[in-house]
Amino acid sequence: MTFTFAIPPADRATAVAHFRARLSVETDVSDVHADLSARTPALVVVDSRGVAAWTQGHLPGAVHLPTAEIATRAAELIPSGSAVVTYCWGPGCNGATRAALEFALLGYPVKEMLGGFEYWVREGLPVVTETGLTRRPVDDLTAPTATITCDC
């Protein structure tokens, strides 16, 4: 008996349903970057953090809409028919999850960006700061140093 399989894996139908459900509500920084670079129509990326965090740095093209303001301001900032991707600080924060829930309650198709701002930066993707567009070196523990995608 191993630790990994102390509880047997789910049957095929359960596994397919589980992983399909996760992919229906989650995306990752590499896919969001690819869609933003391709200018995917009707995609709106929402930074749900506060003003200080937004000012420190945010994704190019993101809309700043703190979670507490989504219910009252989403209609004025997010065009009807848009698909929304939310992000917050990173995997240790559930702000993007709370923001995604707010958008779902309003009827928007929505996904949460796994890894948040932290993994966007760690993968060496561009960030807008008060001084302009910048990039940090790729963290080789989160992404290959020669490309922006892990090819997974």
Image (spheres, helix red, strand yellow):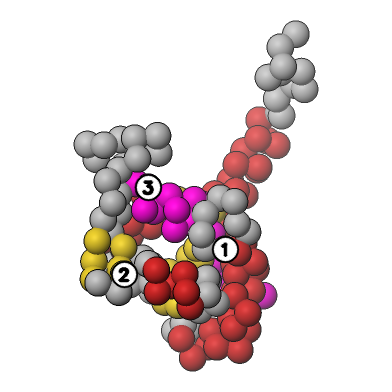
Rendered position, 39 above or below 135: below
Q: Which residue is mark 2?
A: 129
**What whole-number distance in Å separates the C-alpha atoms at marks 3 and 1?**
18 Å
Crowding near the residue tagged with mark 3, few <14, some 14–19, many ≥20 C-alpha atoms within 10 Å: some
Query: Visible in this render: residue 1?
Result: yes
Q: Position of residue 79 (x, y in %)?
A: 44, 84
Magenta range is: 105-123
Distance in Å between CA atoms under marks 2 and 3: 15 Å
Horizontally, residue 55 falls left or right of residue 113, namely left
- Tell me the element at label 1: helix
Q: Is residue 35 above or below residue 13?
A: below
* Residue 120 placement (x, y as % from top left): 39, 53
Which label sits on residue 122?
3
Q: Are marks 3 and 1 in contact (CB under 8 Å)?
A: no
Q: Quadrant of the C terminus?
A: top left
Residue 96 in magenta stretch: no
User: Is residue 107 in view?
Assistant: no
Amino acid on which the number 2 mark rests in the picture: Thr
Number of numbered labels in the structure image? 3
Q: In this figure, which residue is indicated by the disc labeled 1?
A: 96
Closer to the observer: label 1 or label 2?
2
